Image: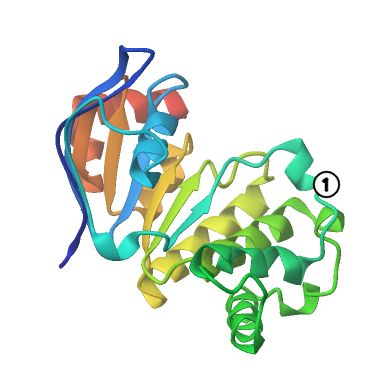
C-alpha cells in the first residue's frame, strides 16, 4: 500500500460547529507535505484528526492500519517542555512507550534503538546531558530522535522551527530533508515558513477553515493562493 492517508469530503467540528471542511487529498509514502495557512486556519485541527485524537464530523478518512501506534509526533514546544528536567537519553527512550504493550521497562534492544537514532541525528554526545540545559536547536534534535523511536514510516510535525534562530531553523529543515530522503520517512509538517516549505516539501496543503489548495509545490507557486501567500511572507 502506497497511500498513508486518504480523505474525501472530510469535516471536523467542535461543539457541533464545523471548523474545518472540504478536505479532499491523499498522502503517499515518501511525501513531504507542508500544511500552510494563517492562525485559525484549522492546521492543528487537521493534525489532531490525522493522529486520531479527534474524530471526523463527516466524510471519509482512511488511514494505513500499520501506522496505529507507530506515528512519530513532534508537537509545538511549550516553555515547560523546554525546561523538562530529564536526561536526553531518557527523553529519547520515551518515544518507545507506545510500542511497549505489556513490558513497561526498557530493555537492551530499546536502548540500542534510542542510541542509533541519536547517532543518526548527531546527538549521541548529548546522551547524559539534561534536556533543559540544551540549546533550542539541540532540543529539537532530541525530540526528533524521540519521534523516530516511535516510527519507521511517518513523522507529523507542528511548527517544528518555531522559536529557533535562522541558523538553527535551517539546520532543522536540512535534517528533516535527510530523514525524508535517506530514511524514507514520510513527513507532514505544519509551518508558517512557506519559503522553507517550497524549498524542501514536494506538496502543499493550504487551509483556511477549508481546503484552499492541495498539490505540487510547482503548482502551488503558480496558483492564485500561492502567489498571495508567498508575497505576504516576503
**Could you tell me which residue is drawn at 32 percent across and 12 percent down?**
16
**Image vertical order of residue 126 relative to residue 210, above or below:** below
**On the rendered image, what quadrant is the N terminus found in?**
bottom left
**Is residue 228 visible in this depiction of the protein?**
yes
**Image vertical order of residue 198 relative to residue 209, above or below:** below
Q: Secondary structure at mark 1?
A: loop
Residue under pointer 1: 83
The image quarter in which residue 123 lies: bottom right
197 and 142: which one is in front? 142
**Could you tell me which residue is drawn at 32 percent across and 49 percent down?**
33
**Image vertical order of residue 106 relative to residue 168, above or below:** below
Q: Is residue 51 left or right of residue 219?
A: right
Q: Residue 68, how many percent across, how many down?
A: 35, 59
The image quarter in which residue 93 lies: bottom right
162 and 234: which one is in front? 162
**Is residue 30 visible in this depiction of the protein?**
no
102 and 30: which one is in front? 102
**Image vertical order of residue 95 relative to residue 105, above or below:** above
Amino acid at each position: 500500500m502506497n497511500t498513508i492517508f486518504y480523505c474525501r469530503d472530510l469535516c471536523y467540528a467542535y461543539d457541533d460547529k464545523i471548523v474545518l471542511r472540504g478536505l479532499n487529498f491523499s498522502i503517499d509514502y515518501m511525501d513531504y507535505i507542508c500544511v500552510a495557512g494563517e492562525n485559525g486556519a484549522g492546521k492543528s485541527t487537521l493534525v489532531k484528526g490525522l493522529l486520531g485524537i479527534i474524530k471526523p464530523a463527516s466524510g471519509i478518512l482512511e488511514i494505513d492500519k500499520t501506522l496505529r501506534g507507530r506515528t512519530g509526533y513532534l508537537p509545538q514546544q511549550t516553555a515547560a517542555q523546554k525546561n523538562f528536567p530529564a536526561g536526553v537519553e531518557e527523553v529519547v527512550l520515551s518515544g518507545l512507550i507506545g510500542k511497549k504493550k505489556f513490558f513497561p521497562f526498557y530493555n537492551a534492544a530499546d536502548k540500542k534503538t534510542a542510541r542509533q537514532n541519536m547517532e543518526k541525528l548527531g546527538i549521541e554526545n548529548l546522551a547524559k546531558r539534561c534536556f533543559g540545559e540544551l540549546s533550542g536547536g539541540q532540543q529539537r534534535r532530541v525530540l526528533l530522535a524521540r519521534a523516530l523511536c516511535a516510527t519507521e514510516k511517518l513523522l507529523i510535525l507542528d511548527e517544528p522551527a518555531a522559536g529557533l534562530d535562522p541558523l538553527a531553523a535551517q539546520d532543522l529543515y536540512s535534517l528533516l530533508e535527510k530523514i525524508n530522503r535517506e530514511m524514507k520517512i514520510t513527513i507532514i509538517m505544519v509551518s508558517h515558513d512557506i519559503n522553507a516549505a517550497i524549498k524542501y516539501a514536494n506538496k502543499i496543503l493550504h487551509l483556511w477553515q477549508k481546503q484552499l489548495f492541495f498539490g505540487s509545490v510547482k503548482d502551488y507557486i503558480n496558483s492564485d493562493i500561492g502567489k498571495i501567500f508567498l508575497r505576504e511572507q516576503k
